[in-house]
Image (cartoon, helix red, strand yellow):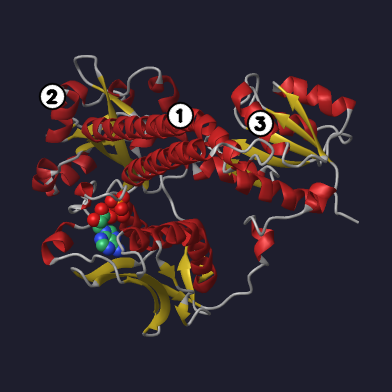
């Protein structure tokens, strides 16, 4: 370390006094005088800039600054001298130092004024931040790559969901229609066969949904939105949706017991999904004449438990130890009951995502109790059921005429909807094969209801509706979305864009009719 020669005796004294400290400093210390000449250059400065002190002392400090910063540096220095104060300039300001070999390196600089008698100096502490910047850049690159991968995975899932559901829509749509068409009833043996096709299709659909859920949970793409929910109400929905299966299996499904007024923090759709899974298992792994009971109770002051108990085949210790493992059906794969062995894995993960847990107690040959425990919530005033988009009982609105425009580019789907709407003879169905054609048709005659496929050839359903909304004469038509894309984000987007309902393919024909009856009753109430 050196100081400049004669003339800067004050600095010489300073350097002498702090010799050891300046030598041990991890930062490069450079002191300049009032004219910007370097008067002190410590050991670390020599190393950092690759120059011996003897070469830089007395030179202008700009010698250490690379172009193009050098040009502006003198002005900066002047401004600093006019109002000197302690100041830090972070690495983000793209500050660079210049090494003797010509390469530039990013630095972080702290400036402090130094007054000795009547003299004013400036001390700069300079630190090389190349390493830190490299880490930061690597981190940012890794983060960007992870975000890209996650986006690609989400897109892949969305496509998978769409691609797999579209053919299933044809299978399930036509089998349901064949069974529902009273004017052309199927002969008994074929009725039975078609029923098998439909059941197999539904099983395939359930597997697709489960697989998508598993991968969405794993990739973090699945999120839950928690709200205080009336547990009894959601349980009643799940019981209603399992009742047909219970009848088929000859199992008695009892109405919800316990305190059905309790509320818990949960995601409505996911809570229903978990309960349906537990109820469906309790029915499937049971005997003819067996019973299933769902009971709701408070667990202390903070929790609500929903227990699904059955008098079914039960499980032994060994089976229980393997439960909740993906694709492990703990022996049921050898039995007659259809399944995939991932329902409970999903149910437990969903319970955890809702801040709860799922536990089981079981005895072989006696039965099982699955208990879902959730965080208790205070009761809230909930809107009436119909307002929340849940199909209610079958309506009779077909007596009113209704002009429906179906916007869809897939002809199979058009046939399915056309056949389904023949069950509502008073309604008129028009069809548009593209977004542009739909807009033209609406301009010619405004329909009562738009049924919109979300993936049209020329635009998305959202874009088509947005362009209708831009014209006052075409805006505000009641609309229902039909899409093979069941990702919750897509559903939310459509509901936010003013769609009344979002039906997913494969269509449940009865649910479609219920939904349309409901919408029709409001659009064209029967006098
Ligand atoms: P799946 O029913 O599709 O096989 P689950 O993940 O829902 O898959 O269940 C995993 C396994 O746990 C089932 O295959 C069955 O062997 C067993 N199981 C689940 N629920 C019950 C129950 N209530 N009674 C007896 N066994 C059950």
Q: Quadrant of ligand 1?
A: bottom left
The residue drawn where x is 29% and y is 21% is 63
Residue placed under numbered mark 2 in the picture? 52
Query: Which numbered marker is on residue 159?
Result: 1
For numbered disc 2, what is the local secondary structure? loop
Q: Which residue is most to the right?
A: 527
The quarter of the displayed image where residue 24 is located: top left
| First reached walking from the N terminus: tag 3 or tag 1 | 1
| First reached walking from the N terminus: tag 2 or tag 1 | 2
In terms of depth relative to the viewer, which is nearer, 239 or 287? 287
Q: Quadrant of the N terminus?
A: top left
The spot of residue 220 in percent (x, y) is: 36, 45
The spot of residue 147 in percent (x, y) is: 37, 34
| First reached walking from the N terminus: tag 3 or tag 2 | 2
Res 462 seen here: no
Instruction: Judge left or right: residue 348 versus residue 188.
Output: left
Residue placed under numbered mark 3 in the picture? 461
The answer to the question of whether label 3 and label 1 lie on touching residues, with beta carbons closer than 8 A, is no
């Amino acid at each position: 370390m050196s100081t400049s020669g004669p003339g800067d005796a004050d600095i010489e004294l300073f350097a002498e006094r702090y010799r050891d400290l300046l030598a041990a400093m991890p930062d490069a210390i450079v002191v300049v005088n009032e004219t910007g000449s370097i008067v002190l250059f410590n050991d670390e400065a020599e190393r950092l800039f690759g120059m011996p002190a003897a070469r830089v002392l007395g030179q202008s400090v700009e010698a250490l600054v690379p172009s193009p910063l050098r040009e502006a540096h003198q002005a900066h220095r002047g401004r600093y001298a006019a109002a000197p104060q302690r100041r830090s300039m972070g690495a983000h300001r793209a500050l660079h130092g210049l090494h003797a070999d010509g390469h530039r390196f990013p630095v972080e600089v702290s400036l402090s004024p130094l007054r000795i008698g009547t003299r004013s100096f400036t001390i700069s502490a300079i630190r090389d931040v190349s390493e830190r910047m490299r880490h930061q850049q690597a981190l940012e690159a890794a983060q960007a790559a992870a975000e890209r991968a996650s986006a690609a995975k989400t897109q892949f899932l969305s496509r998978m969901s769409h691609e797999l559901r579209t053919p299933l829509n044809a299978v399930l749509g036509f089998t349901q229609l064949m069974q529902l068409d009273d004017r052309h009833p199927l002969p008994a043996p074929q009725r039975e066969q078609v029923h098998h096709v439909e059941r197999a299709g539904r099983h395939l659909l359930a597997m697709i949904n489960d697989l998508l859920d598993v991968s969405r949970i794993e990739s973090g793409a699945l999120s839950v939105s928690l709200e205080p929910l009336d547990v009894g109400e959601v349980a009643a929905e799940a019981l209603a949706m399992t009742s047909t299966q219970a009848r088929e299996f000859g199992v008695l499904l009892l109405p919800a017991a316990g305190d059905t007024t309790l509320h818990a923090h949960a995601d409505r759709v996911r809570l229903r999904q978990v309960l349906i899974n537990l109820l469906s298992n309790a029915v499937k792994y049971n005997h003819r004449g067996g019973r299933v009971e769902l009971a709701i109770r408070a667990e202390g002051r903070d929790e609500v438990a929903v227990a699904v108990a059955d008098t079914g085949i039960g499980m032994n210790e060994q089976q229980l130890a393997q439960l909740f493992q993906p694709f492990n059906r703990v022996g049921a794969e050898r039995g007659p009951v259809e399944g995939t062995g991932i329902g409970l894995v999903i149910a437990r993960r969903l319970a955890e995502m809702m801040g709860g847990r799922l536990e089981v107690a079981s005895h072989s040959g006696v039965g099982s109790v699955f208990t879902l425990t959730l965080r208790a919530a205070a009761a809230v005033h909930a809107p009436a059921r119909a307002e929340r988009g849940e199909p209610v009982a079958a309506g009779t609105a077909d007596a009113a005429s209704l002009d429906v425009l179906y916007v869809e580019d897939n002809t199979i789907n058009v046939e399915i909807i056309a056949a389904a709407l023949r069950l509502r003879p008073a309604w008129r169905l028009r069809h548009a094969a593209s977004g542009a054609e739909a807009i033209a048709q609406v301009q010619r005659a405004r329909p009562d209801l738009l049924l919109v496929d979300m993936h049209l050839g020329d635009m998305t359903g959202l874009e088509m509706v947005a362009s209708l909304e831009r014209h006052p004469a075409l805006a505000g038509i009641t609309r229902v979305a039909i899409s093979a894309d069941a990702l919750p984000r897509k559903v939310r987007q459509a509901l936010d864009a003013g769609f009344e309902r979002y039906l997913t393919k494969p269509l449940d024909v009865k649910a479609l009719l219920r939904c349309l009856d409901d919408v029709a009753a409001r659009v064209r109430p029967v006098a």
